[in-house]
Image (cartoon, coloured by chain):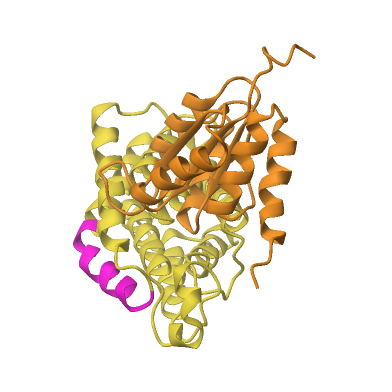
Chain colours: A orange, B yellow
């Protein structure tokens, strides 16, 4: 294992049908994680700015946050889930070690960014994000 | 089977596949308003425009850089659909065509039976991706009967076209269990599924290309 300072961090990609939602969740996660050292990128909406998901934007975002330690992709619903699964199934579209996270987008994004910024590996990031499902609000 | 349709030992070449997909693009464009109408009843009213945009990109890409084999043709088309559609139908139709194209390899000529097997592999991949089963009111309800009809002992492209159309109509009384329509529960009953409808158009275009 390398020094803490040289440790490669897991990248986070946030996918929503809305660019505004994805961008805002990324900003919020950064804010709530104390600036979070791990790279995070939003991939919201379609390439022409409409509501929907764009595999091209998702793949670009994943490349942008890839530091060689894996990429955790959090999604909202429907085509966002299917788009990431389709890209993963193709095998060559996303950086090695990219994983789809089964987590709520907002809560999961905060948990993922906080955890990734500590230098946790991709399994640790996935676990932290998916545990956000267990946090009951009522 | 009509006498003009390819027989079992006939081969299908790259121009056949280009014809299929350009016919599909024209058909999707003609039917875009109907697809969107169906989608406005139980979905988010974008299926027609999404499919039209995706297949227009397919037709453009095929014209710009015509692929050298049937498999490469389907893979290129699938890639365009995955990246251009912007809705769930993009990954689903893209996976259908890419997986079928990969199954065909780089042979320049293939038999109808090989195409039936490749489409079967594509449909299985769609089922796996979406997690849907027959009867869930999805595109599978048109595609599965179509590949069954195409691959059977008396299989033909015309029979596949008819089976897909019948499968799409059969979605009307079904309760949606996948996608945006599933949020509607019982209110999804009584509407034809837009995805099954566009799937029937795709298979009808295949039958037309074979005539």
- Main SS of residues in magenta: helix
Residue A121 falls within the magenta-colored stretch: no
Q: Position of residue A137 (x, y in %)?
A: 64, 68
In the displayed structure image, the side of residue A25 where residue B66 appears, left or right:
left
Please name the residue shown 22% across and 53% down the image.
B26
Quarter occupied by the C terminus of chain A: bottom right
Q: Could you say which is closer to the camera, residue B5 or residue A67? A: A67
| Residue B107 falls left or right of residue A137 | left
Observer-nearest residue: A51 or B193? Answer: A51
| Residue found at the far front of this picture | A34
Quadrant in which residue B34 is drawn: bottom left
Q: Quadrant of residue B31?
A: bottom left
Residue sitting at x 40%, y 46%:
A24
Q: Which residues are magenta?
A: B29-42
Q: Residue at x 40, y 34 (%)?
A: B76
Residue furthest to the right: A1
Q: Is residue B36 magenta?
A: yes
Q: Residue at x 63, y 30 (%)?
A: A117
Instruction: Point out residue A129 in the picture as x, y percentages from the top left corner.
Output: 66, 47
Q: Is residue A135 visible?
A: yes
Which quarter of the rendered picture does the N terminus of chain A lie within? top right
- Residue B129 placement, left or right of B172: right
Q: Is residue A13 above or below residue B204?
A: above
Q: Is residue B199 above or below residue A7?
A: below
State whether residue A69 is above or below residue B102. Answer: above
Above or below for B115 versus B127: above
Residue B118 makes an appearance in the image: no
Query: What x and y, as percent, mark residue A33?
Result: 57, 38
Q: How many marks?
A: 0
Give the percent coordinates (x, y) of residue B209.
Answer: 32, 51
């Amino acid at each position: 294992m390398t020094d803490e300072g040289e440790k490669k961090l897991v990248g986070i990609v946030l996918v929503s049908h809305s660019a505004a939602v994805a961008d805002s969740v990324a900003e919020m996660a950064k804010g709530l994680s104390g600036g979070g050292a791990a790279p995070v990128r939003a991939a919201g909406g379609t390439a022409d700015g409409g509501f929907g998901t764009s595999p091209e934007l998702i793949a670009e975002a994943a490349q942008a946050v890839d530091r060689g330690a894996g990429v955790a992709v959090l999604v909202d619903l429907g085509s966002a889930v299917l788009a990431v699964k389709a890209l993963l199934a193709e095998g060559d579209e996303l950086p090695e070690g990219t994983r789809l996270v089964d987590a709520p987008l907002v809560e999961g994004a905060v948990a993922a960014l906080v955890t990734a910024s500590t230098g946790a590996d991709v399994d640790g990031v996935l676990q932290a994000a998916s545990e956000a499902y267990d946090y009951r609000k009522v | 089977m009509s006498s003009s349709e390819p027989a079992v030992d006939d081969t299908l070449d790259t121009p056949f596949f280009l014809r299929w997909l350009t016919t599909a693009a024209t058909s999707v464009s003609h039917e875009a308003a109907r697809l969107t109408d169906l989608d406005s009843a139980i979905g988010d009213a974008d299926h027609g425009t999404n499919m039209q945009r995706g297949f227009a990109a397919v037709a453009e890409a095929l014209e710009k850089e015509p692929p050298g084999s049937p498999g490469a043709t389907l893979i290129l088309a699938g890639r365009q659909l995955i990246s251009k559609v912007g809705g769930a139908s993009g990954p689903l139709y893209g996976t259908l065509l890419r997986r079928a194209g990969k199954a065909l390899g780089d042979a320049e000529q293939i038999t109808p039976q090989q195409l039936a097997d490749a489409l079967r592999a594509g449909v299985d991949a769609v089922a796996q991706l979406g997690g849907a089963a027959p009867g869930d009111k999805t595109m599978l309800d048109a595609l599965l009967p179509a590949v069954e009809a195409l691959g059977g002992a008396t299989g033909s492209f015309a029979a596949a076209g008819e089976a897909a159309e019948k499968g799409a109509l059969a979605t009307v009384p079904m309760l949606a269990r996948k996608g945006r329509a599933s949020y509607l529960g019982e209110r999804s009953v009584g509407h034809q599924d837009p995805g099954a409808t566009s799937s029937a158009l795709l298979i009808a275009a295949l039958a037309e290309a074979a005539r």
